[in-house]
Amino acid sequence: MIQKGSIDDFGMIMSISALREVNDNIAKAADRYGTRLQDKLPSLVAVSKTFDAKDIEPVLEAGQRIFGENRVQESQKKWPQLKEKYPDVELHLIGPLQTNKVKDAVALFDVIQSVDREKLARALAKEFERVGKSLPIFIQVNIGAEEQKAGIDPNDALSFVELCRDELKLDVQGLMCIPPNGVPAAPYFAQMKELADRAGLSQLSMGMSADYELAVEMGATHVRVGSAIFGTRPKPLPH
Ligand SMILES: *Cc1c(COP(=O)(O)O)cnc(C)c1O
């Protein structure tokens, strides 16, 4: 329900049409992959980083409930209030997590998609034990083995999954990746699917605005879409 005057109508109409288009494209791609037959449409994670609550609210009003953010501090400025108003929101952390922010992240987020190193996995396990809850996590794989990019090396992914799942008792749901820029993503998506299958993990977070349909066709269960929903980001990303 829209409170009159609280959200500008133009923003509302734009959000509804952008969301509808992305959801339609996901459904069509899922048909091509065959997931719809199994009645499991991939989840759309709406990536709201750099956008303010006033830009996010029309998307919430349009019915979207799963959101992704890549920085803990930025999320703390907008999501506690939004979650109070929309309690069924599911907030995914999709960016780098420093161990000194683990406590804050566990308090605010519902899913941590960016578990990318042993130190972080151990810190999360400790915090989950301390607070008596365990969040679902994804292991971030550096599928292009790029020097500057976060994530577990693909060759170490299976043993890292085992460490997280068996030793640390983390609720490992799947794998996540950001493939290399400027080259076709398909070979990387295929490798991710194979890795997830070998690890016995059913969830796969891959595909962004430029390639989410391809990702769904190749087995993604979560796509992370920002600019195709919110428009071009207002400022270049810090770091
Ligand atoms: C920003 C971001 C996205 C969304 O990117 P778009 O190209 O705007 O769809 C997805 N995943 C991660 C990890 C991001 O940081």
Image (cartoon, rainbow, N blue to C red):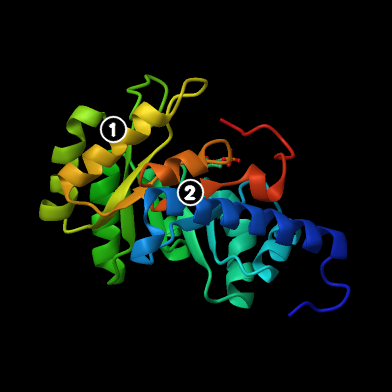
Q: Is residue 95 above or below residue 8?
A: above
Disc 2 on helix, strand or loop? helix
Identify residue for label 2: 29
Disc 1 on helix, strand or loop? helix
Q: Which quadrant is the C terminus positioned in? A: top right
Structural distance between the alpha carbons of marks 2 and 1 = 19 Å
Q: Is residue 214 above or below residue 45?
A: above
Nearer to the camera, 24 or 84: 24
Q: Quick check: 199 left or right of 215? A: left
Which image quadrant is residue 85 in? Answer: bottom right
Q: Position of residue 207 (x, y in %)?
A: 47, 41
Q: Position of residue 229 (x, y in %)?
A: 66, 50
Image mark for residue 191? 1
Q: Amino acid at mark 1?
A: Gln
In terms of image quarters, where does ligand 1 lie?
A: top right
Q: Residues within 10 Å of mark 1 (few under 14, many from 20)?
A: some
Q: Nearer the viewer, mark 2 or mark 1?
A: 2
Q: Which quadrant is the N terminus positioned in? A: bottom right
Identity of the residue drawn at 65% across and 67% down? 60
Q: Quick check: 132 left or right of 35? A: left
Q: Position of residue 89 (x, y in %)?
A: 53, 69
Identity of the residue drawn at 63% across and 68% down? 82
Image mark for residue 217? none
Label located before the other in sequence (2 or 1)? 2
Q: Quick check: 66 left or right of 154? A: right
Q: Amino acid at mark 2?
A: Ala
Identity of the residue drawn at 30% across and 37% down? 192
